Image: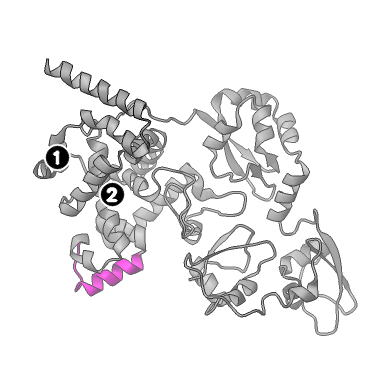
Amino acid sequence: MRIIIILFACFLALNLSVIAGENSVQNQEVYAPCLDQEYLDKELISDLFGCIERGVPLTYNPRIYGFIDYFVNRDRAYTQRVIDRSYTYFPIFEEEFGKRGLPDELKYLSIVESGLNPKAISRAGAGGLWQFMPSTGKMYGLKVDYLIDDRLDPYLSTVAAAKYLESLYRQFGDWELALAAYNCGPGKVRRAIRRSGYKKSFWEVYPWLPRETRNYVPQFLAFVYIMNYRAELGFYDESGEYLPEFKTITVNQNLDVETFSKSLNTCYEDIALLNPQIKRGLIPIQRKDLQVRIPIECYDLYEENKDVILARSSELDEQKKHIVATYDRTSTYGKEKHVYKVKSGDVLGRIAEKYHVRVSDIRKWNNIRGSMIRVGQRLAIWKAPGYNAMASNTRVSQTPKPVPGSKVHVVKYGDTLWDISKMYQGLSIEKIKSLNSLKTSRIKPGQVLRIG
């Protein structure tokens, strides 16, 4: 009889929610009748934590209980969503972490970072499942530009995250401190350790850490518990989202992904799901040896008709040609030719600064190998239509603005580090390079730079 009553209550709650047209927050309650309240008992949770096989210390305290209660009761829809997504991405994490001998629990960190959304971009400019800033991502081999963002690639970013976590653990010898450093940076964790009197554990240095980090590690530990006991906590566990099986090909040309998908007799959405790093449906020829995943059932068709498919997919319409040309600063597509006559005392660097281009651009346009130019030589300079060299020299002479709250600048076409350094107060080229770990002055449209 008790079972019948419980089943009837579940049925009634489900139908009432449909009739009432409840919003997403109310819909979370659909799962609540199946929740075993014992698994939210403050005393019992401590014992249940001890039953989880672990490589990361699983501390339990009221702070962690607060997050468990929040994600189980108040934001069930979000928790259900990440459970569904875990089927897509956890196998990738488990394989990479397993190869490196890293604790399996580290896979739950991506929930805290991105909600398992590979296209997540934070207000600070961090991106992907593991929320790498462009500068940190570059340190671990992740290239970021206007068309392709390796941070959004689930496989490449997971390799980078594993390497970074390994490095942080080697520095601190403690997983909770390593996780804290992943969030706020190793420098801030070392500062907290010093201020605590050189204590050795996360909870001992907790008061000296940034507020976000004080929430970050407890939230991670809360999800370790929730994900291990999700069935007992009443979450539906059979609607997982899986990636299609795929094969990987190498692309070294301009490629329109929509045309490519049609040529493979598959839908664009499947290619986009497998390749979230391709941000605008275009692959530029400048991006060499790009690994692209295609559904496994399309692979034989691709191999049999590779040349035809790639040739067809390389044909871009005018709008897409313009996008690729914008990506490649040296492209002359859609630009007007300016001719500069070299004067006595001129050097390539000064001419490049005058036109807001790079020295390498001038070299390529004029087939110059070194830096030697002669008086009277005519140099071709390609700029967007309507560009005025004299007017452009005054565009950065305005009063510098304060650094915005986001502390980032998105590079626009024609921007140079010198331009950007003059736009904001207290900024220099050297500071921009330091903040973004830049070894050269090369930047690209769409690139996100830290400026504070």
Amino acid type of disc 2?
Phe
Regarding mark 1 in the picture, which secondary structure is present there?
A: helix
Q: Residue at x 49, y 67 (%)?
A: 407
Q: Residue at x 33, y 68 (%)?
A: 188
For disc 1, the neighbor class at 10 Å (few under 14, some 14 to 19, many from 20) is: few
Confirm whether the magenta stretch covers residue 200: yes
Q: Residue at x 80, y 70 (%)?
A: 388
Relative vertical location of residue 292 with respect to residue 398 in this rendering, above or below: above
User: Of callouts 2 and 1, which one flags the residue occurring earlier in the amino acid sequence?
Assistant: 1
Tell me if 32 is positioned left or right of 158 in this view: left
Amino acid type of disc 1?
Leu
Q: Which residue is mark 2?
A: 220
Residue 3 image point, x, y percent:
15, 18
* Residue 326 visible to an observer of this rendering: yes
Stretch in magenta:
186-201
What distance separates the C-alpha of mark 2 from that of mark 1? Answer: 16 Å
Residue 226 image point, x, y percent:
24, 40
Confirm whether the magenta stretch covers residue 205: no
Q: Residue at x 24, y 37 (%)?
A: 228
* Residue 57 visible to an observer of this rendering: no
Relative vertical location of residue 297 with respect to residue 268 in this rendering, above or below: above
